Image: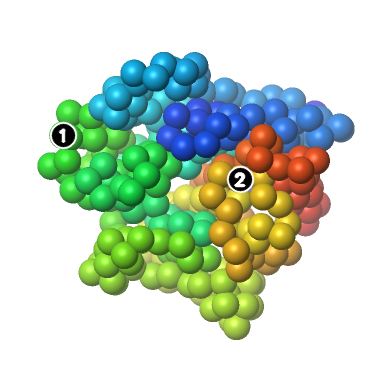
Amino acid sequence: MFKNKFWTKTIANMSELGAGTRGASLGFQALKLIDKENRFFSQVEHIPNSNEKILNSSFKMPELMSTIAEINKTACDRISKSLENHARILYLTGDHSNAIGGICGLKKYAGQQPIGVVWIDAHGDLHTPQTTPSGNLHGMPLGACLDLNKISNPNAWGKLTSISGHSPALSPEDIRFIGIRDLEKIEWDEIEKNNMHFKSVSDVRNIGACQMAEKCLKSLSNVNFIYVSFDVDALDPNISRGTGTPVKNGFQPNEILEMLSVFLQEDKVKVLEITEINPLLDNENKMAQTILEMLNNLSQQ
């Protein structure tokens, strides 16, 4: 079986319950379909999902949050346990609400030690049920991990915010946003209020992708472990529109590849998440092809 030096286990969580557009649950299948040599996906641990529940038109927000919390709790436990035996996990997810389980899994593994998050995304995903304009949970993973607005629907929301056993699982000063450009005012206000660090696409280009990634890691010297989340909508839509919420003026693949190459050289980085590949919105599976090429390039370095 092919092995690479950057991750030793792959976990797939193809829940798409947090998205407003169907198709993200097929992201793993899209990748596997074009991995002709079966280099990356011959042995993958799958997290059970409840995607069939979205067919129920009476599915209400509290029930939806509770179900997503259950899925993420399973992911949290699996990731925490796997990190005891694996240096790094590649975490492939359907929609970005599954990052809750990934981040919380790293926090459960870390215990009292602080963790950092590098968030490569067009969006801030800092919403809560009180602030969301869409009602979609994939816009709330950092809101949940930061335990924002804990008074909002404490029964269902509380399940999401506490699955690691540590609430909050994450501190705002330990988040590094890269490429964010499509946020609601309330999210920008949250970033400003907590003095969260962020770099725009133009900032990265002015500094240089590798140099920016190196600076990012140095700025997280206070944390013991790091979670890197790459939402494919960080890429520019001229590459592919195979994701639920594409936003113009994004990164080119080589820029993402350069950043990931630097991040994955750092032993503190324990989980790499790749999320929101949606082949139903794509043309000729271009997004999955782009991501597979990145994985191939990373494995050959």
Q: Residue 88: image x %, image y %?
A: 57, 42
Left or right of 250, for residue 171: left
- 240 vs 91, left or right, is right
Occupied quadrant, residue 289: top right
Between the residue at mark 1 and the residue at mark 2, the CA separation in whole angstroms equals: 31 Å
- The quadrant of the picture occupied by the C terminus is bottom right
Residue marked by disc 2? 243
Q: Secondary structure at mark 1?
A: helix
**Residue 41 location, x and y as percent?**
72, 30
Left or right: residue 58 versus residue 18 is left
Q: Residues within 10 Å of mark 2 (few under 14, many from 20)?
A: many
Q: Residue at x 16, y 34 (%)?
A: 154
Relative vertical location of residue 301 with respect to residue 105 in this rendering, above or below: below
Residue drawn at x 66%, y 57% as measured from the top left? 237
Residue for badge 1: 154
Judge whether 188 appears above or below 169 on screen. below
Tell me if label 1 and label 2 are in contact, CB under 8 Å. Answer: no
Nearer the observer, 251 or 225:
251
Above or below 295: residue 8: above
Q: Quadrant of the N terminus?
A: top right
